Image (tube, rainbow, N blue to C red):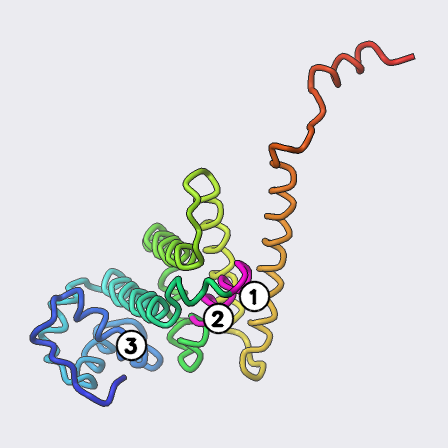
Amino acid sequence: MTDTVPDFADMTLDELKVALAPDIAASAIFDGWNETALTAAAEMAGCDPDVARLAFPGKGSQLAMEMIEAWIDSIDQAMEAEWPAERLTELKIRERIRTLVAFRLDAVADIDEAVRRALAVMAQPQNAARALKLGWRSADIMWRLAGDTATDYNHYTKRAILAGIYSATLAVFVNDDSEGKADTHAFLDRRIDGVMKFEKAKAQFLNKDRELPSLTRFLGRLRYPAR
């Protein structure tokens, strides 16, 4: 929420979605991700509720996902503004990823219940595919900000792994009663450390300069043991 009222009349519907998203999330704490939250958010922001409904035309679960997607978009945009790629270059890869995920956690630190309700909506069978797409998109943005330029299978595995880490961290986050969400951040650190160790081991194994044993020679020795 901001101190100045934005000029909603000059916004496109996509811009309006993102502008209203933080207020919708705040309302979802009490009302859930539904039309009541949308109306309350519009009134809170000083936007005509009828105009807000044009930006979010869905009903029921579809409306909930439209609002959640806009909320995720608003966090993505805030993250990109706060941590542009050039600012992250001073950090090691591990710290770049941790910083970006931590930013996202801090962005929703005071609205745990909105996150909990959003995760429940995204877990519904009819929303699973869209939820996976949103997780992938956020992971892609984080890796691009971190400087990743992979175009081979690593491009996909990195994003799939990070999306999984982020999803698991959010599950811990909504049930974390520790001060400052310390348990959540400790969980995040352990998961990232595990991935970094795996990536290091994989890189060593796939190193083209590493002399690998000949498979033909190995099979030959099985058939004709050395005396």
- Could you say which is closer to the camera, residue 69 or residue 88? 88
Q: Is 187 displayed left or right of 116 in the figure?
A: right
**Mark 1 sits on what residue?**
188
Q: Residue furthest top?
A: 224
Assess disc 1: are there few (<14), some (14-19) or many (≥20) residues with their C-alpha within 10 Å of its C-alpha: many
Q: Earlier in the sequence, mark 1 or mark 2?
A: 2
**Mark 2 sits on what residue?**
102
- Residue at (27, 84) in percent of width and height: 1
Q: Amino acid at mark 3?
A: Pro
Percent x, y of residue 95 = 54, 64
Assess disc 3: are there few (<14), some (14-19) or many (≥20) residues with their C-alpha within 10 Å of its C-alpha: many
Q: Tags 3 and 2 in contact by the CB under 8 Å rule?
A: no
Q: Amino acid at mark 1?
A: Leu
Front label number (3 vs 2): 2
Element type at marker 1? Answer: helix
In the picture, the disc for residue 22 is 3
Element type at marker 2? Answer: helix
Q: Is 126 displayed left or right of 12 in the figure?
A: right
Q: Where the C terminus falls, by quadrant?
A: top right
Relative to residue 26, is residue 17 depicted above or below? above
Percent x, y of residue 133 = 35, 52
Percent x, y of residue 52 = 14, 73
Q: Tags 1 and 3 in contact by the CB under 8 Å rule?
A: no
The answer to whether residue 183 is magenta is no
Q: CA distance from mark 1 to mark 3?
A: 24 Å
Q: Amino acid at mark 2?
A: Ala
Q: CA distance from mark 3 to mark 2?
A: 18 Å
Q: Tags 1 and 2 in contact by the CB under 8 Å rule?
A: yes
Assess disc 2: are there few (<14), some (14-19) or many (≥20) residues with their C-alpha within 10 Å of its C-alpha: some
- Could you say which is closer to the camera, residue 10 or residue 116? 10
- Give, as a single range, the part of the protein colored magenta: 91-103
Q: Is 165 displayed left or right of 17 in the figure?
A: right
